[in-house]
Amino acid sequence: MNFDEMDQDHLEAYGFTHLFERCLNKKGGETRLIDNFVYNIHSHNEYSDKYYWRCAQRPCRASATTYEDLARLNAKEHNHDCLKDVD
């Protein structure tokens, strides 16, 4: 089965269970807000259409992967608190 052919249940089995919000940073670049943490784009896999994101707060090593409208949080934990007042 190709990644593009996966249904909702298969995506959840691969850990894609988080919703995210599309945002722009101060310079107009795309960011993602996932569980009140901001992520900057790191790379894009054109074959699978997955996007890879890193935490915007350096030197935090937390990362996430997005596919369509779902996100998967990767293994590294954040080394800082999340944003408090996110609307």
Image: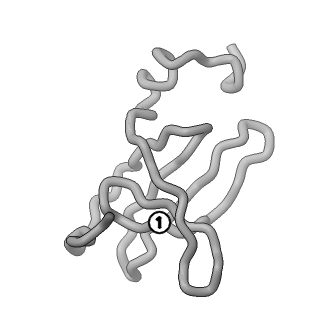
Residue 37 drawn above or below residue 44: below
Say which amino acid is labelled 1. Tyr
Residue 47 drawn above or below residue 40: above
Q: Is residue 76 or residue 27 the one in the foreground?
A: 27
Q: Mark 1 sits on what residue?
A: 39
Residue 36 lies in what quarter of the image? bottom left
Left or right: residue 61 versus residue 85 is: right
Q: Residue at x 61, y 18 (%)?
A: 6
Q: Is residue 52 or residue 21 the one in the foreground?
A: 21
- Looking at the image, the residue that sits furthest to the front is 87
Q: Is residue 66 or residue 36 the one in the foreground?
A: 36
Residue 35 lies in what quarter of the image? bottom left
| Number of callouts | 1
Q: Residue at x 39, y 40 (%)?
A: 18
- The location of residue 33, given as percent across then percent down, is 43, 60
Q: Quadrant of the C terminus?
A: bottom left
- The location of residue 69, given as percent across then percent down, is 55, 39
